[in-house]
Image (cartoon, rainbow, N blue to C red):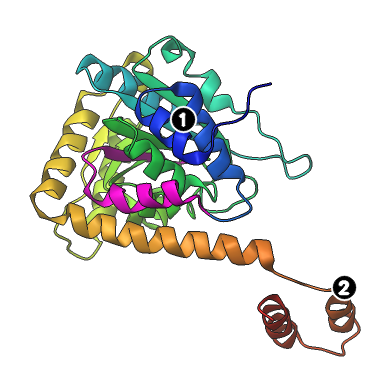
Amino acid sequence: MSEVAPPPDLWRQARDGDVRALSRLLSMTEESTAGVPREVGSAIADSIGSTARVIGVTGPPGSGKSTLTSALVSHFRGLGLRVAVLAVDPSSPFGGGALLGDRIRMLAHTGDDGVFIRSMASRGHLGGLAAASFTSIAVLMNTGFDVVLVETVGVGQSEVEVAAACDTTLVLSTPGAGDGIQAVKAGILEAADVVIVNKADLPGADVAVRQFRDALGLSPLAAWRTPVVSSVASNSAVDDVVAALDAHWAWLSAGDLEEVRRARMMDTIRALAVDEFRRHLKLSEDIVLRVCAGEMTVPVAVRKAVMASFA
């Protein structure tokens, strides 16, 4: 068996278009227990000035995220752009594995050399992404892709981490998914750069669009006014979505892109720091038993666990 190339060689090969090297580099990033490889760390820094667009697609299960992502891949490929897809699927709480069904839905693109599809299990990480998502996005931004599409788990209103990882965040809903109160709940809607009412051929689509527009009108004024558009992704009817995406990218490029990516850098470092701490956290059974016996409060137990981890 041939020796696995060290990270510097993998990095060079991945940048030269070697799909296997890119896959291996992403696997090392995802599975690393020794921190971020130096070459990947450099990629994170370089992503600030990358010309690649990073688009997040999020929303509840069944809203058509995978179908819309596939339609966007077709659109960007029609423009001759290289596209990477990072699809995060939920992990089993028992076995830890994932079906990786998002990749199954994108089989139409698997024979296209201009498309790279990477499935990633969330491994219990909350917020719609996986712990390695930030670094994986940075790698894809610096290996020759023009567009990186990030499809999240689809867990609901708390799935806001995608906004910190992407330049533009698309939030999907469907007709009949909720009432007007549902539309104004804080969380995922506030993370949206574009709101999409998908499956707009179903009854109630116009009502849903109006409710979302009314809800967004209650939000504090911001430089970017979040549009609400409808689509039928199953029929590749995504012209309005593409127009909204292009408008937001033009707005970012005119002034706020670097600021958005600096904020992403902060979230990336924070996510990596939290992940590193989680791996080194030392929580002894003795502390747990003393809490259960009423001999120690939970805040004291937390402080002792933190102190033991850094001792």
Mark number, residue 22:
1
Image point 73% across, 45% down: which residue? Answer: 93
Could you tell me residue 186's position as x and y percent?
40, 61
Q: Secondary structure at mark 1?
A: helix
The magenta segment is: 36-60
Image point 33% across, 17% down: which residue? Answer: 114
Query: Camera-side residue: 228 or 281?
Result: 281
Task: Judge whether residue 56 is colored magenta.
Answer: yes
Asked if residue 203 can be seen in this view, the reply is no
Image point 38% across, 28% down: which residue? Answer: 84
The amino acid pointed to by label 1 is Leu
Image quadrant in which you'd find residue 82 = top left
Horizontal side, residue 285 vs residue 138: left or right: right
The amino acid pointed to by label 2 is Glu
Query: Camera-side residue: 15 or 257?
Result: 15
Asked if residue 44 can be seen in this view, the reply is yes
Mark 1 Cα within 10 Å, few/some/many (few <14, many 20+)?
Answer: many
Mark number, residue 295:
none
Could you tell me residue 5's position as x and y percent?
54, 32
Query: Camera-side residue: 63 or 73?
Result: 73
Front position among marks 2 and 1: 1
Image point 43% across, 62% down: which residue? Answer: 269
Could you tell me residue 253's position as x and y percent?
13, 46
Q: Quadrant of the N terminus?
A: top right
According to the image, label 2 marks what residue?
Answer: 285
Horizontal side, residue 252 vs residue 44: left or right: left
Circles 2 and 1: CB atoms closer than 8 Å: no
Up-down relation of residue 113 to residue 176 (above or below): above
Image quadrant in which you'd find residue 14 = top left
Task: Judge whether residue 308 is colored magenta.
Answer: no
Toward the left, the furthest residue is 254
